[in-house]
Amino acid sequence: MDKESLHKILLQVSEPHEVSNVWKRSYTEAGVFSYGEEDVMRVSKAVKILLGDNNIRYSFSSKDLEEKIFRLTEKTLNVGNVEKEEIIQSWIDEFEAEINKKVDNFEVVIPIENFKITSNLDVGDVEFFVFDKTYCSKWFPDSTTEDDKKLEKNKKPPDIIENQLMNRTCGSVRIKGSPEYVIEAGRNKISLALNILRLFTYVRGDDFYRRYFGLKETLTCNGVDGVYLVTDKGLKVESHYRTGFLFPFEVDDNRKMYMEHTGFGVICNILKKPKLTDLEERLLTSIFWFGQAMSVQCIKERKNDLKSDKFYELASYSFEADRFIKIITSLESLFLRGEEPKRNTLSERMALLLADDLRSRLLIYEMMKEIYEHRSRIVHGGDTFMSTMELDSLAGLAQAAIFRVLEKIKTKELKTLTDLYTFFEVQKFK
């Protein structure tokens, strides 16, 4: 964005409103500013416009940018036009200097807990790899100049990096921006990739063996973990955080075969596209929520050993209800639109998609209606009990539905949401 455009936007934000007293600040006893609704709307609009520029979007989060603009409006309050112009120009100069200083090409690397791979695995532009000495040498390259040699002792990998990363599976994605932006965007991209992999869960087996995996803070694991940003010159930023024993989720040859047969390649192709169709956007949203659901830890077999522990039973049922609601959300985001009746419409569409004969369709239809009724009791009535069979049945149906949509995208039967809804109408009146 050029300086002239930026200056115009900031000038509009800083202008007092002629009708309502929006720039009149009311103070609490502590002297804290209270902003009017129009203040917030004007600043929010400016933030949205500014974030449309790549250089700005890559440099600041919306929250940081909003705070900067609010601080600017405070400085321009009740000053003359000449002084206001000077304040805005000074703000722009500092703003551009901060952008140039912060932006770089980073590789975001985050260790993944309880996740094993037999070879490097790509999910869109996210790569999963096992961190070893080869990667460590990239982060801490050999000294090449006298200045580098003087700092050689600082190039030795810190113990925490070797202890936290060596021989662990990590997720990696390359992003341009400031460290703050890159960490947030990188975590989001890697989280989406993990949720895509959770789509290929063995619904009953992975739960039984507690094969839960993901970013460490999402699991009940004690310890310290971190996010690492790497440039061509080596490790630049490391950020550590503390978190809360599980069996690893392993992408072995059998799982790879399962993934390829059920649509993993289709998802990877979608992730590489610069512009998605409305159906592809809905599909990724659905997969995201299914992945979130399967990351909820439901350790069912422990209840048999803790029958007298009522608190643990209630907590366990709450976890299972959490998974249940997220799976329903996954299905709603893909198959429902607008103000359609949810229970009957979702039940009907699941039946039409998953079965070809009348008897099977009726069975799925009645099962889904009962499942959705249970969803209403959880959300509106506070019911938390969830049978293992009901939960596993719902997960299996949702997984099968997503796989079926992926198959139809692959064969080009479905390209848009209109195609999907037309498919349901055709099946209904076949």
Image (cartoon, rainbow, N blue to C red):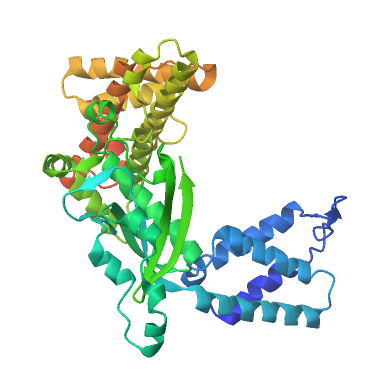
**Residue sitting at 79 percent across and 63 percent down?**
17
286 or 171: nearer the eye? Answer: 171
Asked if residue 374 is positioned above or below residue 418 in the image, the reply reads: above
**Residue sitting at 43 percent across and 29 percent down?**
340
Q: Quadrant of the C terminus?
A: top left
Residue 375 on image: x %, y %:
43, 21
Please give the count of numbered marks on the rendered protein.
0
**Residue sitting at 73 percent across and 78 percent down?**
87
Query: Furthest-bottom residue in view?
Result: 146
Whether residue 280 can be seen here = no
408 or 233: nearer the eye? Answer: 233
Asked if residue 68 is positioned above or below residue 269 in the image, the reply reads: below
Query: Furthest-right residue in view?
Result: 29
Residue 402 on image: x %, y %:
26, 36
Whether residue 318 can be seen here = yes
Quarter of the view holding residue 326: top left
106 or 243: nearer the eye? Answer: 243
Asked if residue 14 is positioned above or below residue 401 in the image, the reply reads: below
Residue 295 on image: x %, y %:
36, 36
Residue 140 on image: x %, y %:
33, 72
